[in-house]
Image (cartoon, grey):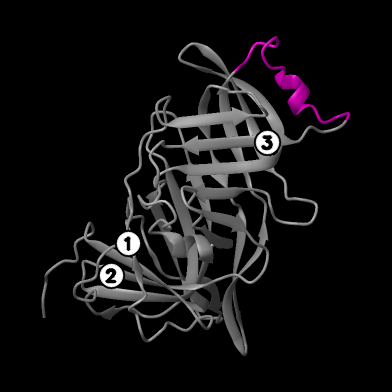
Amino acid sequence: MSNEPLLWRILTVAAVIEDEYGVTPTDLSTAVFFDVMTKDSPGVYQGDTAERERVKPGFGANEQINVAPYSTRTIRVPYAGSGTPGVPPSFWPLMLCSGHSETIDMTVDEEKVIYDPVSSNFSSISLLWWSDDDELQVLPGVRGTLTRTTDAKGMPYFEFNLTGLYVRPTTEAPPAGATRAPQAGEVPVNKQNSTFTFFGYAAPMQSWSFDMSGQVEHRNLPGYEGVHLTNRNAAGQVNIQKPRLADFNIYEKIESHNGTVVDTVTFSHNKTPGNIVDFEATRVQLSNYAETEVQGITHSTMDTRLLSAPEGDGDYRYVFR
């Protein structure tokens, strides 16, 4: 017996696209190893529970039963590209399993990778999670949702909240010689690196968060188990320096009691080809207006509702170029 502890900070993570839902490929040569910024507490063994109730001659607890086991992970990755135009970022499998399609455009001098939200034909991955390069948990059938944090003077990131089928961890090391997929480093959100356009106005931006708000459901029924994406209500919250009315009448944009205004909001980050990330939302409605103070300056905060196109989807897209 060894009393050697598992070290928290040593972590290796990889993902592989599943050809058949919930079935981890036996050939892991296509597994993608990617950078993880921080390690959140892993949901190794989660699930809905029920009690095995009994009337007893005295007080005391009843046994608790996990009636639908599953596993979860929260993974934070850099808000950055691969470093090469037309090459997907290292975390591309997470984008696919979180309800996006991937389009690679190799037009000369315009190479880019585009991720659009979809409402059907979702991809799934098997997530491989090595703790201390010794204990492996495989999560088959993973699907999830994502958020983005882009605060001024901060390092931007994506955060994926993933749910997969439960498999008991085993003792296994990562494959020898495994290398991480190409991934450029993130750069801070500031005047030098970022451009923000808000309803046609170049607003000084304090922050603009994004939440895909994907509804992720684990189902465990006689004859079936799986994880499904069943809805998406993409939204966010923006904080900008409040403009003077002569420059930009914010009230005309937020009022909805006598008609609504829908317009485009874009955020382009980084200036180096291969590490540029554009976020485009062409049908944004503003709501829940409030004012706050930042460094003695009046700021406006609003919710941004990312509306889908009349034909469905098209509420936003990410372009890595």
Residue 43 as seen in the image, left or right of residue 313: left
Q: Position of residue 89 (x, y in %)?
A: 41, 56
Bounds of the magenta span?
242-258
Q: Position of residue 244 (x, y in %)?
A: 65, 11
Q: Nearer the viewer, residue 1 or 72?
A: 72
Specify the farthest residue to the right.
258
| Amino acid type shown at disc 2 | Trp
Q: Position of residue 295 (x, y in %)?
A: 45, 14
* Distance in Å between CA atoms under marks 1 and 3: 33 Å
| Amino acid type shown at disc 3 | Thr
Q: Residue at (69%, 31%) from the top-left corner?
A: 288
Instruction: Specify the quadrant of the image occupied by residue 35.
Output: bottom left
Proximity of marks 2 and 1: CB atoms separated by less than 8 Å:
no
Regarding mark 3 in the picture, which secondary structure is present there?
A: strand
Give the overall secondary structure of the magenta segment: loop
Residue under label 2 = 130
Instruction: Specify the quadrant of the image occupied by residue 285.
Output: top right
Q: Quadrant of the N terminus?
A: bottom left
Instruction: Specify the quadrant of the image occupied by residue 228.
Output: bottom right
167, above or below 122, in the image: below
First reached walking from the N terminus: tag 1 or tag 3: 1
Residue under label 3 = 264
* Distance in Å between CA atoms under marks 2 and 1: 17 Å
| Amino acid type shown at disc 1 | Ala
Q: Which mark is residue 181?
A: 1
Regarding mark 2 in the picture, which secondary structure is present there?
A: strand
115, above or below 21, in the image: above
Q: Nearer the viewer, residue 63 or 239?
A: 239
